[in-house]
Amino acid sequence: MEAMTRTPAFDDQGYLFEPADWTEDLARDLARQENIELTERHWDAIRYIRDFFAEHQVIPDVRFVMRHLGARHGGSRNLVFELFPYGYVRQACRIAGMRKPRSWSTG
């Protein structure tokens, strides 16, 4: 018997209600809506966000993602904003399948 696949539910701003409903195909679709073609650097950021959330049950602060990307890829301290130009929360967290944070001061 096949497992039933549930259609992901989104809030009125396009964030997943349930991060467990996320898939890589869904990430590609969400990125396409933002006119972003996902590169390995994008995937590195997305996987870091998801892994951090799985371990801590909170979305990582953008500073943690910036440090992670800097350590792995070098270059600009603002690489996360080069990859997701409309903001960490609006694009990176949304594409990674996170719920929208209730309040956020970093993008």
Image (spheres, rainbow, N blue to C red):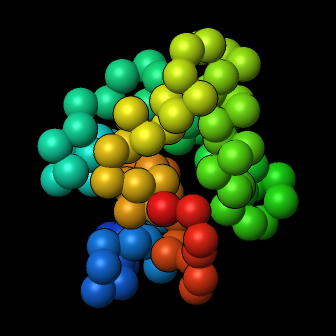
Looking at the image, which is closer to me, 99 or 73? 73
Q: Residue 2: in sight, yes or no?
A: no
Task: Locate residue 37: give its quadrant.
Answer: top left
Q: Is residue 83 left or right of residue 70?
A: left
Q: Residue at x 36, y 22 (%)?
A: 39
Q: Is residue 33 left or right of residue 66?
A: left
The correct choice, above or below, for 89 with respect to 15 in the image is: above
**Which x, y percent locates residue 107?**
48, 62
**Which x, y percent locates residue 22?**
46, 57
Looking at the image, which is closer to me, 69 or 42? 69
Q: Residue at x 69, y 46 (%)?
A: 63
Q: Is residue 10 left or right of residue 107?
A: left
Q: Residue at x 65, y 41 (%)?
A: 65
Q: How many numbered marks are there?
A: 0
**Which x, y percent locates residue 104?**
59, 74
Q: Residue 71: in sight, yes or no?
A: yes
The correct choice, above or below, for 50 with respect to 13 in the image is: above
Residue lying at the far right in this picture: please name it.
56
Q: Is residue 28 left or right of residue 83?
A: left
